[in-house]
Image (cartoon, rainbow, N blue to C red):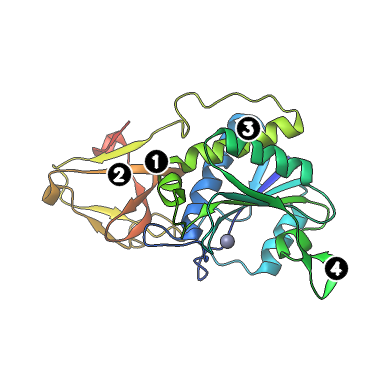
């Protein structure tokens, strides 16, 4: 089915993104937000696609080509900002998308994030073109570049994004549904419906984890967690890209995929 919406997780692969700090890389936060929204739009029956679902490098040309060729009418390009401000920014094209951007901003504000600005910017060398390539080169697709907050905020964005990124991702879903007059229903449990926490039992000596850009199969592991050594381990679940495969953040290996199910001793709740 032709998607209505395509979600673009900013950056990826060799490009970590400027909106990174010691707690997260922008490419990982933007992917977690995008996978969350992808799952939610699927639940809501809105045909949706992604420009990337793993940690791969996409050139601006490849990225915008995927968007243009997707058949979608709308795009969220998800980013984390840098530069010392605080709050969310939504950037639309000089040719349109203002109303969608404002709907998204309104819902983000209602979810607790302050809005720094909703704006549009022209290319200085050619005022008929948009400054940002996701606005300039996405053809007829109405694209909102959504900056959820600042990685280097001196106010509350770092704490807010760590604690509330799901709520902000959900706010954008709600804003988009309101904008397109599509029925909206909140997630069944709290935002991030589905499994939230993964526990690895102390009875397991080792547990493989995999980089996001490789198949989560034996041989591709980036390393081993050691549940027995720590009397069991516990992780927050950021995403569920494949059946029984979860995205978690580890101390030693960063954001990784892990294969886990109750049949092999994992506890998911
Ligand atoms: Zn970015």
Q: In this view, does 25 lie to the left or right of 228?
A: right
Nearest-to-viewer mark from 1 and 4: 4
Nearest-to-viewer mark from 3 and 1: 3
Q: What element carries label 1?
A: loop
Q: In this view, does 200 lie above or below 55?
A: above
x 66%, y 50%: residue: 117
Q: Where is residue 266 in the image (x, y as percent from the top left)?
A: 26, 38
Nearest-to-viewer mark from 1 and 2: 2
Q: In this view, does 108 lie above or below 22?
A: above
For the residues bearing labels 3 and 1, Cβ distance under 8 angstroms: no
Instruction: Residue under label 1, please give it.
Output: 244
Q: Which circle marks residue 127 in the picture?
A: 4
**Mark 4 CB near ligand 1 (8 Å cut):** no
> Quadrant holding ligand 1?
bottom right
In space, the residues marked 4 and 3 are separated at their CA atoms by 33 Å
Q: Where is residue 112 in the image (x, y as percent from the top left)?
A: 52, 36
Quick one: label 1 or label 2, which is nearer the N terminus?
A: 2
Q: Position of residue 135 (x, y in %)?
A: 75, 59
Q: Residues within 10 Å of mark 4 (few under 14, many from 20)?
A: few
In space, the residues marked 2 and 4 are separated at their CA atoms by 48 Å
Quick one: label 2 or label 4, which is nearer the N terminus?
A: 4
In space, the residues marked 2 and 3 are separated at their CA atoms by 27 Å
Instruction: Residue under label 3, please give it.
Output: 174
Quick one: label 1 or label 4, which is nearer the N terminus?
A: 4
Quick one: label 4 or label 3, which is nearer the N terminus?
A: 4
Q: Residues within 10 Å of mark 3 (few under 14, many from 20)?
A: many
Quick one: label 2 or label 3, which is nearer the N terminus?
A: 3
Q: Is mark 3 on a helix, strand or loop?
A: helix
Instruction: Residue under label 2, please give it.
Output: 235
**Mark 2 CB near ligand 1 (8 Å cut):** no
């Amino acid at each position: 089915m032709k998607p209505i919406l395509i979600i673009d997780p900013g950056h990826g692969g060799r490009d970590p993104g400027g909106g990174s700090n010691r707690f997260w890389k922008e490419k990982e936060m933007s992917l977690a937000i995008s996978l969350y929204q992808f799952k939610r739009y699927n639940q809501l029956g809105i045909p949706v696609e992604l420009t990337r679902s793993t940690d791969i490098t996409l050139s601006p040309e490849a990225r915008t080509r995927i968007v243009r060729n997707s058949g979608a009418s709308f795009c969220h390009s998800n980013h984390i900002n840098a530069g010392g401000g605080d709050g969310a920014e939504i950037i639309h094209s000089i040719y349109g998308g203002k109303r969608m951007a404002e709907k998204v901003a309104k819902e983000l504000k209602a979810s607790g994030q302050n809005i720094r600005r909703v704006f549009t910017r022209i290319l200085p060398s050619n005022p008929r073109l948009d400054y940002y390539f996701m606005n300039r080169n996405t053809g007829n697709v109405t694209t909102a570049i959504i900056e959820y907050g600042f990685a280097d905020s001196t106010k509350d964005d770092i704490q807010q994004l760590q604690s509330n990124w799901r709520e902000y991702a959900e706010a954008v879903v709600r804003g988009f549904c309101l904008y397109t007059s599509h029925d909206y229903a909140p997630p069944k449990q709290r935002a991030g419906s589905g499994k939230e926490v993964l526990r690895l039992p102390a009875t397991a000596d080792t547990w493989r984890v995999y980089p996001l850009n490789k198949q989560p199969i034996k041989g591709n592991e980036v390393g081993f967690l050691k549940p027995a050594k720590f009397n069991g381990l516990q992780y927050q679940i950021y995403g569920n890209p494949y059946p029984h495969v979860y995205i978690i953040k580890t101390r030693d290996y960063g954001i990784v995929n892990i294969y886990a199910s109750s049949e092999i001793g994992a506890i998911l709740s």
